[in-house]
Amino acid sequence: MKKQQALAARLHPRLRNWFFANFPGFTHAQELCLPSVLKRESILLTSPTGSGKTLAGFLGVFDALVRELEAGALKPAVRCVYVSPLRALAYDIEKNLKAPIAGMGLEEELRIHLRTGDTTVSERTKFRNKPSHFLVTTPESLAILLAQQNYVQHLAHTEFVIVDELHSFAGNKRGADLSISLERLQMLRGKNNLCRIGLSATAAPLDLLAQFLVGKNRPCRTAEARIEKEQIVDVFSPIRRDPYPPSGYTGARLYAELAQLIRSRQSVIVFSNVRSAAEQIGLRLREQLPELVDAIEIHHASLDRSVRLDVEDRLKNGELRAVVCSTSLELGIDVGAVDLVVMVATPKGVSRAIQRIGRSGHSLNKNSHGILVATNVNDLVEATVTAKLVRERALDPIEILDKPFDVVAQHIVGTVALAPASADSIYQLITRARPFHDLTREEFDRLLNYLEGGGEALAQQYRGVFGKISVSEDGMVSLAHPRVAREFLVNIGTIVSEGFVDVMLKRRRLGSVEEGFIKGLQIGDLFVLGGRVVRLIDTGVQEAFVERADGQLPTIPRWNAAKMPLTSGVARAVRQLRADLAHQLRQESDAFCVDWLVEQYQISLANAQAMVEQFRAQLAVSDVPTGDSMLIELYRDDDFSHYFFHALIGRSANDALSRIVAWRMKNRSGGNALVTIDDSGFLLTLRQFQELTLEDWRSAKRRTRICAWPCVGQSW
Amino acid sequence: MVPRNYPGQQRARKQMHWSTETIFRVLEAHEPDHPLLEEAYRQATQIFLDAEEANVFLDRVQHFDWQLRELPVVSPFSFPIYASKIKETMMLEDPTVAVERIYRELYARVRQIATANDNRTTATVR
């Protein structure tokens, strides 16, 4: 309590009064974060969701601005940049910025500018003429602002940067791009310190994430807010004698039990990993719960933004009993009164599971509750170890994407779009950002050379046409032509769009689906979008026109949604369980093994029995593949030979592995192989004349290193 | 790194794809260490394929005990991937129905084999 009072005393009275009129006291996250920001130290704050994290970042900033205002020293310039991975920022701003500002009666004095791809021209002009103190934006829009002189002058006084959901940026290009943008903001500050505040879900290792936030060799405090509520995680146990029957592989029987769960709760989020599954599950749940048809909604990234926002609002207001989403509700808005999170496909990683479970129990004093549902007994093992790892809080380590060149190229052009700069200074700036700390000068120079005119192969004819920059004798880099700046601004960003077609119901845009999906349809075909069955009646250039076809049997869209690979931590734990259980089964009775599983993994008796039965069956017909054996199973049907390779290393690694093996196979016996991959191995389907012996397969993997990529690239 | 937009117009995906492919082929033949190529390979190995994990596995697997087992059925542990293959290639039948049917058939076979094994073990013990 003393600590709280001492901290409160350091706030400007105006801010303090507003705060305590609205909150009983500081949350742990706020207690940790505020002192650092008051001292202008960079800080990485990790905490589970719903612990006043965003406001924790802003409190210290408010204090600074209110004091400046009082002293008459507040400049008409951006003082704080807030970056979020999501475009749907309006709600956060309402809660974390507008409410405090209005509460302190400073609406006139402290201005906010929301800048995304959707910001209107008049708003932009307004900001250009009269800058706001808070800039709320996305990494892409920030990069665009940083390349234009009219905006950059407003950004030169930025003292605070808040990066929300920092963990979501670490492993991808958006984050790599943001890390250089932060360096450019720092450069605008000159010698003055830029106070960087990173807000993140629980993540590890913290030091690496902190470096990602502040760059090489700069100090950054790290603080972990404690869990304010307990997380409960269970593996769903079907209430029946034969829980995973042979007639129920695809899990259709689960809908009745899911419906029961929804009936018994106030509000439930169901995660399904992929969009098509979200549509499928949503449709079935509505069938199961006719009385709740209007209280069950679908949410995924292919739905129109207005549809999604509407669903989010209704969820927040407690009007919905269930929302079925792909992964789309993992981040972002406070989802309100959700009291249960159901994961129908395994979340493929521990951090992801923890993040999802944290979406429930947002209201005060409520625990988070997550249930992992295995649709069949194969999924059960993964669900079981995931639950155990969640209880142990064995987070998947974050990884930082290593120096993507396209991001470097964009920032070179973006930097010189403002004013010519020396190659040395650009190189130094870029390599201060953590993802680029090992970018060599040689690599950088080759990129400069490429930007000058397409590299050696293309240089001679094309410098005039394709050259973006020119480098002078003394190493000064400048734009090749003013038009390059305009072209740059419309091409900025690292998100590759897939090519979507709008789905129109009369004049209303329902959402979008992949181009390829629509091309495979014929007029009259039925598919599901947003949980409703629609019939395709016409296609346009960028649109597909549909009409409602309620109650009819659909052809579910099979979106080519990228499947998430299993993290190495979960893969390791599955290998461990397999090895341990196989070992037990060879020595002990089934009853003993069931008890052992129940005790080790805290699963229900029914689940443990199902697993033991499955392992027994596997041992009867084959062997249990573990971490120190290479099991290949061959099964022949009438036409084909199926080779099953058991390698529990995640689907992306199996993707790589299967390509090599298939390529070698092709060299040896000719013809193509059909390759199927998943997290626990891959399958090569061959014609019978292509069959190979064990020694052949062994040598297909021997002495192979995946560095000869060009040959793999050509063969596929 | 191939621009998609020009002020006032957007290039069609097909057109982009075509230009990208041409550039890829030209560079591969004439300038294999071009940054565009290097970035393409980096993305292939880091983002789309987990080459690092696959390499670790390849190193380890040399010391493993290798088994090639010929089975009269698809084993329970292999069924999920077999089901994915069915889903990807099934044309005439509803894939969900097909998966259910094949699972039922295979499961019955597996049960049969397991029971036969049990009987044999019991016989030897006697």
Image (cartoon, coloured by chain):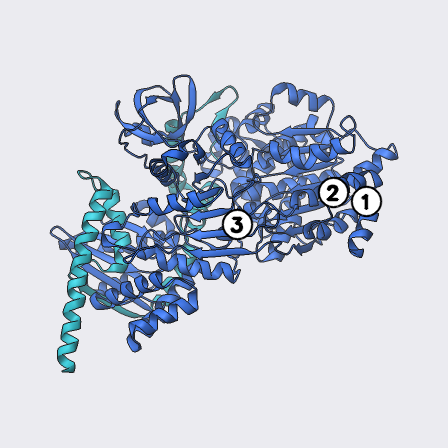
Chain colours: A blue, B cyan
Q: Which label's residue is closer to the chain start, 3 or 1?
A: 1
Residue A272 visible, this angle: yes
Q: Which residue is mark 3?
A: A355
Q: Identify the residue at image location x=53%, y=60%.
A: A393
Q: Secondary structure at mark 2?
A: helix
Task: Give the alpha-carbon distance from disc 1 to disc 2, as whole Å.
Answer: 9 Å
On screen, A394 above or below A22?
below
Q: Which residue is mark 1?
A: A11
On screen, A328 above or below A9?
above
Left or right: residue B56 versus residue A94 is left
Per the rendering, the mark at residue A536 is: none
Q: Identify the residue at image location x=56%, y=45%.
A: A169
Q: Pointer 3: residues within 10 angstroms few (<14), some, or many (20+)?
A: some
| Cβ–Cβ under 8 Å for marks 1 and 2 | yes
Q: Pointer 2: residues within 10 angstroms few (<14), some, or many (20+)?
A: many
Q: Which residue is mark 2?
A: A59
Q: Secondary structure at mark 3?
A: helix
Left or right: residue A341 versus residue A162 is left
On screen, B30 above or below A349?
above
Q: Secondary structure at mark 1?
A: loop
Task: Give the alpha-carbon distance from disc 3 to disc 1, as whole Å.
Answer: 32 Å
Percent position of residue A131, x then y: 73, 27
Percent position of residue A170, x then y: 56, 48
Q: How many badges with numbers are in the image?
A: 3
| Cβ–Cβ under 8 Å for marks 3 and 1 | no
Q: Nearer the viewer, residue B105 or A120?
A: B105
Identify the amino acid type marked 2: Leu
Identify the amino acid type marked 1: Leu
Identify the amino acid type marked 3: Gln
Q: Which label's residue is closer to the chain start, 3 or 2?
A: 2
